Image (cartoon, rainbow, N blue to C red):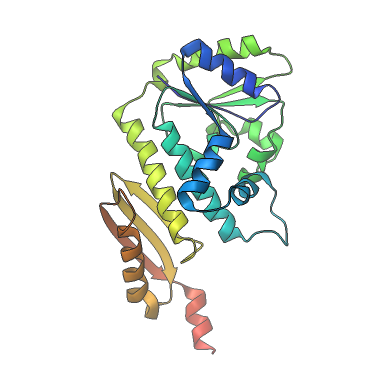
Amino acid sequence: MAVITISKASMGKAVADGIRREFCYGYFDSDEVFLAASKEFGVPEAKIRSALQNAPTLWGMSSATRQKLISCYQSTLAKFLLRDNVVYYGPAGHLLIQGVSHALKVLLWPGDNTTCNIISSISKHDVINEESLYDLVIDTGKTSVEEAVEIISAHALSTRYRTTTFSINCVKNIALSSKVKAALIDVDHDVNVRASGGNVYIHVRAADRKRQKLTAAISNMVKSIRDVVNVEVTVTEDIFQKYAGTYR
């Protein structure tokens, strides 16, 4: 059966609890994920919360730090979802597990979806019309908790959200790629990471003179991460570094 993510909203917790009781599902929320991510990655819980919940400011944390902390949260969230048959209530679940076919991503609207908007940089109007981000949008102004539970339950029973080996592997790949990205952000804030069955594919940009040294450093760092089987690093030339070096 499906894993279900419920957006942070005024009646979201009640709806999530109703789904939990309806299906005898497991339940966890963002507080549990924040705590687990903090312990796993050795980062203060408050900083991870700030990365997800506070709008970026000129004098706030850097973009690289924010990306790193969100990757820590994403990796931990994916691990929680590997339990299967669970309901998650909290921010940005729909954004952090895109591509997982057995995940039913629910937006309760209107409600306090500030967190989702911060991370996605999408306005409220755009969120409602961006169908690729959600599987189901429920107008809570016209729908009771009981009705919302009934609607979500009917969708969750669809064969579309049936768990498969492929979809479980997608969650595992998200968990691993996010963990690797969090580890590499300090090396390159623009690093691109993809994981598939323990194989990790990394793309970074650097000046040609740094290519060999950077490839070796990244490979050694990533190979030490649990569940990584093989690492492939691609380094393309950073044109800005090239010309910066030319005029020094």
Determine whether 178 is above or below 246 in the image: above
| Residue 152 visible in this rendered orientation of the protein | no
Quadrant where the C terminus is found in the figure? bottom right
Disc tally is 0
Task: Tell me the residue at 63%/23% (across/down).
Answer: 13
| Residue 199 visible in this rendered orientation of the protein | yes
| Front-lying residue, 29 or 8 | 29
Task: Tell me the residue at 59%/33% (across/down).
Answer: 90
Quadrant where the N terminus is found in the figure? top left
> Which of the 4 image quadrants contains residue 9?
top right
Q: How far from the left and from the top, in percent, is residue 141?
A: 74, 18
Determine whether 109 is above or below 158 in the image: below
| Front-lying residue, 86 or 174 | 86
Outermost residue, left side: 229
Task: Tell me the residue at 40%/26% (across/down).
Answer: 84
Q: Is residue 69 left or right of residue 84?
A: right
Q: How far from the left and from the top, in percent, is residue 205?
A: 44, 68
Task: Tell me the residue at 50%/53% (across/down).
Answer: 42
Outermost residue, bottom side: 248
| Front-lying residue, 190 or 172 | 172
Q: How far from the left and from the top, in percent, is residue 45?
A: 59, 47
Q: In this view, does 55 lie to the left or right of 212?
A: right
Determine whether 56 is above or below 102 in the image: below
Q: How far from the left and from the top, in percent, is residue 4?
A: 50, 25
